[in-house]
Image (cartoon, helix red, strand yellow):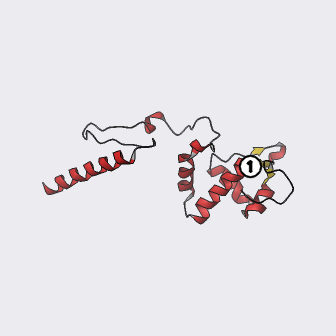
């Protein structure tokens, strides 16, 4: 976690200025990230003053690492965070954009044995076997 040198406990709430200074990220970028990442929700008090919890600061550090050091786009970083949302970063009760139908595995009628695995944690061996089956079918179709 960021090294705060203000004498507060590690779990203390931090203002946007304190987080900005400690992480080297400008306040307007932090405010923009709040709009782009639904997982990032600092507390807002009267007058709109933001207070970041320790978990918010850790999330900002992760976003900074993904975007500025690993080269992810904002959408790509959000996808990585959503994939790891089971780690306790996600404080939302329900994602309105993620329907159960998109998460379920679907098996097209014309390709038996090949499953579409969207967001469930698939067994890699299953995925590889499915891809090999598709490759074999494509090769057979091209030879015909």
Q: How many marks overall? A: 1
Q: Is residue 56 left or right of residue 4?
A: left
- Name the residue tied to disc 1: 54
Query: Quadrant location of the C terminus?
Result: bottom left
- Label 1: element kind: helix
Q: Is residue 97 left or right of residue 88?
A: left
Position of 11 relative to 25 (above/below): above
Residue 44 at x, y percent in the picture: 78, 44
103 or 45: nearer the viewer = 103
Residue at figure coordinates x 30%, y 48% from the top left: 129
The quarter holding residue 96 reads: top right
Residue at figure coordinates x 73%, y 61% from the top left: 23
52 or 74: nearer the viewer = 52
Residue at figure coordinates x 87%, y 56% from the top left: 7
Residue 37 at x, y percent in the picture: 62, 49
Query: Quadrant location of the N terminus?
Result: bottom right
Residue at figure coordinates x 57%, y 50% from the top left: 81
Q: Badge 1: few (under 14), some or many (20 or more) residues near its Cα, within 10 Å?
A: some
Residue 137 at x, y percent in the picture: 21, 50
Q: Is residue 72 left or right of residue 3?
A: left
The quarter holding residue 93 reads: top right
Residue 26 at x, y percent in the picture: 73, 62
């Amino acid at each position: 976690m960021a090294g705060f040198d203000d004498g507060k406990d590690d779990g203390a709430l931090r203002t946007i200025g304190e987080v900005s200074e400690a992480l080297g990220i400008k306040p307007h970028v932090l405010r923009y990230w709040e709009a782009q990442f639904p997982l990032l929700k600092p507390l807002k008090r009267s007058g709109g003053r933001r207070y970041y919890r320790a978990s918010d600061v850790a999330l900002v550090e992760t976003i900074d690492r993904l975007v500025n050091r690993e080269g992810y786009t904002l959408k790509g970083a959000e996808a990585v965070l959503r994939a790891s949302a089971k780690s306790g970063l996600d404080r939302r009760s329900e994602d309105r954009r993620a329907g159960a139908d998109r998460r379920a595995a679907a098996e097209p009628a014309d390709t038996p044995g090949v499953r579409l695995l969207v967001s469930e944690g698939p067994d890699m061996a299953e995925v590889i076997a499915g891809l090999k089956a598709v490759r074999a079918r494509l090769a057979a179709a091209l030879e015909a």
